[in-house]
Image: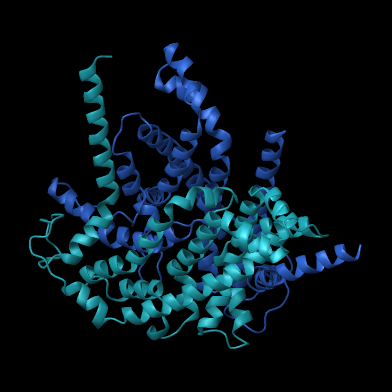
């Protein structure tokens, strides 16, 4: 093949990828542009991706006229507590399944795999019946228990899978050098399993951040909503009138998750695939 | 011996908190759902429900009007089509991304990850309210500009199915592209050289060399995606079936079907039976895939 043809092919490929990337980003760019546009005529057909006049009014409306900051606070509380508790219960459990040998280990593992196939949404009615007599409906504690319990299966399986891929010889060598059990775990295994720890924690965070069905069913009163439940109710109740405000709210809600995602992205493939499960 | 017994005690202690939570939030609901599935609990028999045996299961499986079998059919079609498109598109995209001398592949890859990185429900609501909305959605603005009639994307069964599938592909492709890309990079380059010398084209090389080579690497991710596609709820629920904001399409996958029977028509006994059937189906799937994987490994 001659040089010009090769170069033309490469150019074509780049044009193709630019077009695909733009196409993929259209819904997000559209929302972003609408949220900043000062002259949104709802029925206008003259939309352009670069607003002719900019305004931050929609963002002001999101942050101060709607209880979005309150919802953000609720979501952050729920997400951080769920991630901490989930890691606290899943790390020792996964260690036990991966490194210790005891009767019933195989059955626990197989049981977890079977449980992993039950869709969480189908449990909602039963969980409601369980939590309402003990007064945990409409409380953050109730939701945290639901979220941690739902994600615990994934956490155990994903971490166990990764721990299995860490050679046990390194820990044995450390033990010969005089490290005790706890030291080996804290100083050897956990640092080596960092990708899986980060990805597991992030999956719990993303799950809680994005969960709307439980939040909207179990919490009453807009003050107790999470961002997901709040945004859902925002679009359900006043959508047609304030699509620009909704667009701004979507951007606000997505930014923290985008930041977390891209900060941890380089761990994603190794941290997820070693365990063989995805959230 | 004594040390060993202590070992088992430690093992169970380390597992106990996780297992206790799983027992409450995962195992108890399954058992309770199994119990309710044998009763006639519904809005008329909220407290006075009684055991009616397997009648709910019979209604779900043998009474065609119940809608479960058609929802199952739709779900099978949904899963099959989504998987076919995902695998082919992701393979082509990953192959193109791996063409040598493509300088900005990192930029493209990052941009292509956005649909995965965005909160799923936000994206779906943006699609619904920004793109598909029949009055001010972007798609109809474009249609109008092209001089075409506006389309009510989400109101017909077929167009709602296709729209939902498109959104699902949009959401799911980044993960698949990432997996395929990783798999392609792990294939040994020297492997190809003989094929290139022999003059095999891209398509021939893909079929006879690349695909067999990446198959074992992508298999776990494909199985996982198969399950998440089958269990997809958010896309169809948020696009077409939100309470109070239905679009008119009567599109059900098994999960939206079970959900609606529980929380919209409050037919708890029946919905529980459907949930249990789904659970057994999914267990069946996962046992088969496990067996096949084991056989392939031998």
Question: What residue is drawn where x is 21% and y is 53%?
Answer: B140
Residue A30 position, x and y percent, is 22, 57
Farthest residue to the top: give it.
Answer: B198
Task: Looking at this view, name the residue that lies furthest to the right.
Answer: B1
The percent coordinates of residue B185 (x first, y second) are 46, 34
Could you say which is closer to the camera, residue B121 or residue A105? A105
From this viewpoint, is residue B250 visible? no
Residue A45 picture quarter: bottom left
Residue A232: x and y in percent read 37, 71
In this rendered view, identify the residue nearer to me: B47 or B17: B17
Between B115 and A179, which is closer to the camera in this rendering?
A179
Q: Quadrant of the N terminus of chain A?
A: top left
Q: Chain A: give its colour.
A: cyan
Q: What residue is rendered at 51% in x and 76% in y?
A: A81
- Chain shown blue: that is B
Q: Is residue B34 left or right of residue B268?
A: right
Residue B195 against residue A174 in the figure, above or below: above
Q: Residue at x 49, y 27 (%)?
A: B210
Q: Is residue A40 above or below residue A3?
A: below
Q: Nearer the viewer, residue A17 or A81?
A: A81
């Amino acid at each position: 093949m001659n040089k010009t043809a090769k170069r033309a092919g490469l150019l074509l490929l780049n044009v193709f990828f630019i077009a695909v990337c733009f196409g993929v980003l259209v819904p997000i760019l559209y929302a972003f542009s609408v949220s900043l546009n000062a002259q949104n005529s709802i029925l206008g057909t003259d939309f352009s991706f670069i607003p002719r006049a900019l305004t931050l009014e929609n963002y002001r409306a999101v942050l101060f006229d709607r209880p979005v900051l309150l919802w953000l606070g609720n979501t952050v509380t729920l997400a951080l507590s769920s991630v901490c508790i989930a890691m606290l219960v899943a790390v020792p459990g996964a260690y036990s399944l991966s490194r210790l040998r005891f009767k019933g280990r195989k059955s626990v593992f197989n049981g977890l795999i079977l449980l992993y196939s039950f869709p969480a949404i189908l449990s909602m009615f039963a969980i409601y019946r369980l939590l309402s007599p003990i007064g945990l409906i409409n409380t953050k504690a109730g939701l945290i228990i639901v979220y941690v319990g739902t994600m615990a299966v994934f956490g155990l399986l994903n971490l166990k899978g990764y721990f299995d891929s860490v050679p046990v010889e390194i820990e044995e060598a450390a033990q010969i050098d005089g490290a005790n059990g706890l030291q080996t775990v804290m100083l050897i295994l956990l640092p080596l399993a960092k990708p899986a720890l980060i990805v597991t924690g992030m999956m719990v965070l993303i799950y809680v951040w994005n969960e709307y069905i439980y939040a909207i069913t179990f919490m009453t009163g807009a003050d107790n909503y999470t961002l997901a439940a709040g945004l859902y109710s925002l679009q359900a109740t006043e959508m047609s009138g304030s699509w620009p405000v909704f667009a701004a709210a979507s951007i606000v809600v997505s930014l923290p998750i985008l930041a977390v995602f891209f900060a941890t992205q380089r761990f994603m493939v190794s941290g997820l695939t070693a365990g063989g499960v995805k959230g | 011996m004594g040390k060993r017994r202590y070992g088992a005690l430690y093992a169970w202690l380390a597992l106990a908190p996780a297992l206790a939570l799983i027992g409450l939030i995962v195992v108890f609901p399954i058992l309770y759902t199994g119990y309710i599935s044998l009763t006639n609990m519904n809005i008329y028999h909220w407290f006075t429900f009684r055991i009616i045996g397997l009648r709910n299961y019979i209604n779900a499986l043998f009474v065609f009007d119940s809608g479960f079998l058609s929802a199952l059919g739709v779900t099978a079609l949904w899963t099959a089509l989504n998987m076919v498109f995902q695998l082919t598109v992701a393979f082509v995209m990953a192959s193109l991304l791996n063409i040598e001398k493509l300088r900005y592949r990192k930029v493209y890859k990052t941009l292509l990850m956005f649909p995965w990185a965005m909160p799923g429900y936000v994206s779906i609501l943006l699609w619904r309210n920004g793109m598909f909305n029949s009055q001010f959605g972007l798609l109809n603005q474009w249609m109008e500009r092209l001089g075409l009639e506006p389309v009510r994307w989400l109101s017909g069964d077929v167009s709602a199915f296709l729209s939902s599938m498109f959104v699902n592909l949009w959401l799911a492709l980044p993960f698949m592209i990432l997996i395929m890309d990783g798999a392609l990079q792990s294939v040994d380059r020297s492997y190809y050289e003989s094929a290139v010398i022999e003059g095999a084209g891209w398509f021939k090389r893909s079929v006879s060399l690349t695909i067999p080579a990446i198959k074992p690497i992508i298999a776990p991710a494909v199985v996982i995606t198969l399950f998440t596609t089958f269990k997809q709820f958010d896309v169809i629920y948020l696009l077409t079936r939100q309470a109070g904001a239905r679009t008119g399409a009567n599109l059900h996958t098994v999960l939206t079907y079970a959900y609606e029977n529980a929380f919209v028509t409050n037919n708890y006994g029946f919905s529980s039976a459907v949930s249990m059937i789904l659970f057994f189906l999914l267990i069946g799937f996962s046992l088969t895939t496990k067996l096949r994987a084991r056989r392939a490994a031998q």
